[in-house]
Image: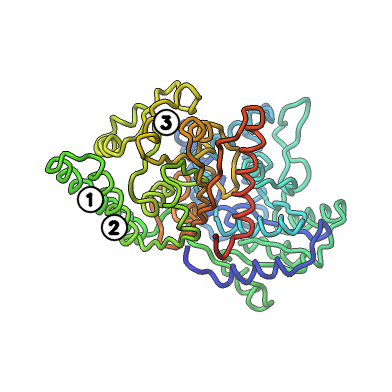
Amino acid sequence: MKSNPALEQQLRRIAESPSGPKIGAFFDYDGTLIDGYSAAAYFFDRIKRGEMSTQEILDTLKLSRKADLADEEFFDVIANGILDWAGETEADLRALWRRLWLEKTATTLFPESWKLIDAHQKKGHTVAIASSATLYQIEPLAQEYGIEHIVCTRAMIRNGRLTGGLDGQPAWGEGKAAGVKAFAKAQGVNLKASFGYANGNEDIAFLKSVGRPSAIQPKPQLEQVAAASGWPILRFPRRSRASAAAMARTVGAYAAMGASFVAGLGLARITGDDRSAADFITTTASDAAMAVLGVKIDVIGEAHLHQHRPCVFIINHQSKFDLFVMMNIVRTRFSGVAKAEAARVPGFGRYMKMAGVAFLDRADSRLSIDALGPAVERIKSGLSMCIAPEGTRSWTPKVGKFKKGAFHMAMQAGVPIVPVVIRNAGEIMGRNDQAMRAGTVQVAVLPPVDVSRWKPDELDARIEAVRQQYIDTLNDWPESIA
């Protein structure tokens, strides 16, 4: 991403602050951790399912156009929303909001806010989400970020079901400030030394309750108060929708890659050499895409990309953009694995066949030992393979658990593992994003891991040690790698 001096300055403030749980870091949710409002996903879902009357829709639209809600208006909105859930179990509500999180909300996460949370967590601060939203809306993000504490609007529960009423006052305005103060007292948190982050005018009282407030994407009144009080003001690029420039660059990048693919097909027909044509497509398409997108890739440890081939490259996986990064830095004589149906994707399926991708049946898509034969044969023929051992893209830069397939592949083929740590790719293109943004991706290529003497009974510990290299590298990015 582009440089954000205000964010970098705030990260330095956090790094220079005292450590330990007596320092709190309180984050508003809607508009601060996510771009927009999580309730919008709920209302659109109800409309889609035909669960809202015309009058409800009109009333909701009327309120949504207001820059600010009066206290009584917000209380009516939250009370009516919770009344709709009367009779539901907490499990029902958690399932609903988990689905909405996966379908809608998670795509709007501000990566910059994650950096702030991560910085506070590394200092051992007591991190909490303080929001007028309900517990069920907030929990999916809290679980993703490893946040234990939530100060929020609570629904009343009786006999395991929601009654339709509120348990206490909503965490809005003075109510949120009171909730934060009560939490701090119970947890032994020093509010005068604590941090607070929020975007709304209704959050002014909450921010005034902490010693180190910051305004994120502030609304006008909050911005005025923040400026007059000397509070840091942080602004982040939108995530709920890509900018026109990002969309245009994305279309241009795909067009450039398509042109490279067509040229590569022509080369294959002329020469009869699919492998060389695939390498041509890989290098020209990735170079053209990065140029159109305005993406720069900074690589340290670059020698390890070339000195140990054939090998198994493993990457941490947050985005489809990871593939474009690997195409750009590895460039030639490498491939990967894919589900068998990917071979039928128009255009790209043809490229994957040319590149020697090992196609696996859906039943074998987890890279079981018996399914590795085609990939192992590719390696023995001189191709390197690129695998994401996490198996799926993550919502944050946190490194997930590694599966064993890539390591079995290297052991069977008798080649080393080369860890490639990718930083910032999720900021260019998030897990479910369709558009790509300009910026810089950092890559650290670590020294090879010799798996030739690994024994089956120590495999779990060995793999975890490799995973820890990723965690350590992301936590303390090196200036160079020998």
- Residue type highlighted by circle 2: Ala
- Which badge, 2 or 3, is on the more N-terminal residue? 2
Distance CA(mark 1)–CA(mark 2): 8 Å
Q: Quadrant of residue 355?
A: top left
Counting other residues with Cα less than 10 Å from the Cα at mark 3, is it few (<14), some (14-19), or many (20 or more)?
many
Residue 52: tell me if it is visible.
no
The answer to whether marks 3 and 1 mark residues whose Cβ atoms lie closer than 8 Å is no
Q: Residue furthest front?
A: 453
Asked which secondary structure carries label 2, the reply is helix
Counting other residues with Cα less than 10 Å from the Cα at mark 2, is it few (<14), some (14-19), or many (20 or more)?
some
The answer to whether marks 2 and 3 mark residues whose Cβ atoms lie closer than 8 Å is no
12 to 176, vertically: above or below: below
Distance CA(mark 2)–CA(mark 3): 31 Å
Counting other residues with Cα less than 10 Å from the Cα at mark 1, is it few (<14), some (14-19), or many (20 or more)?
many
Mark 3, residue position: 376
**Which residue lies at the image location 59% right of the left edge and 60% below the top edge?**
477
- Which badge, 3 or 1, is on the more N-terminal residue? 1
Residue 416 screen position, x and y as percent: 50, 41
Q: Nearer the viewer, mark 2 or mark 3?
A: 3
The answer to whether marks 1 and 2 mark residues whose Cβ atoms lie closer than 8 Å is yes
The quarter of the rendered structure image containing the C terminus is bottom right
Mark 1, residue position: 260
- Disc number for residue 288: 2
Asked which secondary structure carries label 1, the reply is helix
